[in-house]
Each structure stands twice: as structure tokens, then as C-alpha cells.
Amino acid sequence: MNMDNIRDSKKDMDVYKNYAEKAQEKLYENYWNNETKSVMNNFPYSPEKEEGLNYWWKAHAADAMIDGLKRTKDKRFAERAESIMENVFKRNGSLFNEFYDDEEWMALACLRLYDLTGNKKMKEYAIRLWDDIKTAWWDDEIGGMAWKKDEGRKGRNACCNGPAAILAARLYQRFHDDNDLEWAKKIYAYEREYLVDPNNGLVYDGMVVGEDKTLQINKEWLFTYNAGTYIGAGVELYRITNDNGYRMDAEKTAGGSMQHLINEYGVLKNEGTGDGGLFKGILIRYMEQLYQVNHDKKIADFILFNAGKLALAGSNKTGLIGPVWQEAPEEPMDITCQLSGVFLFEAAAAISDI
């Protein structure tokens, strides 16, 4: 993959802001439901697809709006993000969800919106969710956060540990509760010990402990979003502690991802639609966060390279983005893929401002 001079090929870095704005416009145009003031799961509209709430998809839809708010300072994005969240809680019947990782994503979005708007209701939501999330911890010699609440709880997956560590660290940075920092450190330590390949930094999807106390880890499941949230946790802990070990962990995982989680064109791999449509957008989000602290040109160029491929060929005439960033998608298409595209272009736009 040749990414030499990818920046020099763009005389006007504002082009990435234009890409981000267009992707946001198409997200709104194709997926916004004006009756519910929220987003739909699929385009074109499908009654069957709308039967499921998809709590965590909606949390990321709110996050996409918050990205737009951060870039433009336009309050319409804040209004949309808040509306999406309130619609989720109304349909869900409560603030809480049976999946701990879903709650973590919503809490992160609420906290980001509080950061940008000062909306105290969002702060309250984030803290209430965090109080529930903490009950996920396995109180044994191994530790780790559970994935799901029912059936005696399930697994100790990366998907519920990485975001929890990010959330705990950010809560500490904002509200200075030492307990939150201890939570961030111990969750991170669990994931680093049990779910991260020490050779390349790639993150295994999850672990279960058998009745005989043996550890069962599926080392074949290597998803981009697990790498992303581990990078994000390392970045947040580095910001707090200035411990270079956290930054170096994040850099190793980013390097492993850029080498092993790509396709033959050097673009982040296709992980399907549905939940998988969100995965690589999450990795990109936290790689951009890593770039903010280490200013590594390789990371910036990788993000811009992916953004360039998507801008060149990755959307159709309707403006839909699919799971393959160098190919136009067919309809219908899940919102998750559009969200990943928004995250990519917003990350590229943010890099152009650094």
C-alpha cells in the first residue's frame, strides 16, 4: 500500500470537511424519520427492519451528530443527537439495556454531548448508566466486564471492556472521582492481559471461563472495533497519567490493525452490514484520537487514504455508503455502514485541523 504524500495530493484540506458535511447530509436525508425525530435502521424504509430498536446503533447515530456539532458548532446537530437518545429511552422503556456494551456506547455519547453543550441531563444519563455498567464486573481472580445481564451473565468480551475503560477514564477527567480512574485501570489491565496479542497488539473478541476454570479464547475473531476501543482506552489513560506504556500499547495495536485488518487494496476490511457495519468506523474514531496525542504521520495518512478511497468510489447515486469502502453499495443498506463512513470523514476533517 503506497500512501506516500497523501497529504500533498490535497492542496485544500477543507475537502475532508466537505466530505464530512456531505456524508452527514446523506445520513439525515436517507435515514432521518421526521415523525419520531430519530433515525431509521435501514434505507429504503423497511417495516421489518424497524421492529428492532438497535439501541447501540442509535447511540452511534447520536455520536455521528455530535461529530457534526463539534466540527460546525451548529446546534441542529445537538438537537438531533438529544432527540435520538430520548427516542431510544422512550422505545426501550427505560434508560438501561440488557447489554452492558450498548449502555457504554450510550453513556459515551451522552458524556460527549454534555461536554459540548453543558446539558446536565446528559451528564445525569451518563452517570446513571455508569452506575449500572459497574455491576458487569466479574468479581473473581480474573475479572473483566460481562457482556450481557441475563442467563447468569455472559462472557468477558472486548466489546464491553474497551468502551467501559474509555468511559471510566473520561468520567475521571471531567469529575475527578479517583474511583473512576481505578476502574479504568483495572478494566484496561484485564483486557491487556487476557485479550491482546502481545506480538502485534490485535485484540481477541472475547473470553469465557469454563466450569473447570480453563480460559477459552477465540483467537480467530479479530474485529476492527475491538482494536479501536483498546486504542481509545490507552489514549485516555495516557492523557491522565502521562505513562508512555499506555501510548505505546495503543500504537502497537494501531500498527497491527494497519497491517492485518486491511484488504488487498490497503483499505480496512469488509466486516459486513448489520452490527459489523459499525466496526471499522469505531477503529477510525479512536485512531484519530491516538493521532491527537502522538501526531504520527502514518496514522494520519492511513485515515486519509481510507477517506480518499471512500470519497472516490464508496457511495452510490443516493449517497449511501456500504461495508466496502472502495466499492459503491447496493440498496437496501443498514445505517451502520453510513455511520462508519461519517466517522471516517469526520476523522479526516479533524486531522486536517491539527
Image: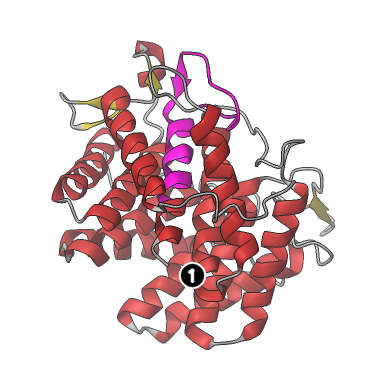
User: At label 1, which amino acid type do we have?
Assistant: Gln
| Colour mapping used in the image | secondary structure
Examine the structure image and report whether residue 342 is included in the region drawn in magenta. Answer: yes
Examine the structure image and report whether residue 125 is included in the region drawn in magenta. Answer: no
Of the pair 74 and 150, the residue shown nearer to us: 74
- Residue 329 in the figure: left or right of residue 178: right
Mark 1 Cα-neighbour bin, 10 Å: few <14, some 14–19, many ≥20: some
**Residue 328 position in % (x across, y down):** 54, 21
- Judge whether 219 appears above or below 321 on screen: below
- Judge whether 304 appears above or below 41 on screen: below
Which residues, given as a range, are shown in magenta? 322-346
Viewer can see residue 12: yes
**Residue tagged by mark 1?**
292
- Residue 7 in the figure: left or right of residue 26: right
Of the pair 1 and 299, the residue shown nearer to us: 1
**Residue 231 position in % (x across, y down):** 60, 64
Instruction: Say which residue appears at 48% left-offset and 70% top-offset.
Output: 292
- Judge whether 112 appears above or below 335 on screen: below
**Residue 339 position in % (x across, y down):** 43, 38
How many numbered marks are there?
A: 1
Element at label 1: helix
Of the pair 106 and 118, the residue shown nearer to us: 118
Instruction: Say which residue appears at 39% left-offset and 78% top-offset.
Output: 172
Viewer can see residue 147: no
**Residue 345 position in % (x across, y down):** 44, 45
Specify the quadrant of the image occupied by residue 309: top right
Instruction: Say which residue appears at 51% left-offset and 60% top-offset.
Output: 288
Instruction: Say which residue appears at 51% left-offset and 48% top-offset.
Output: 149
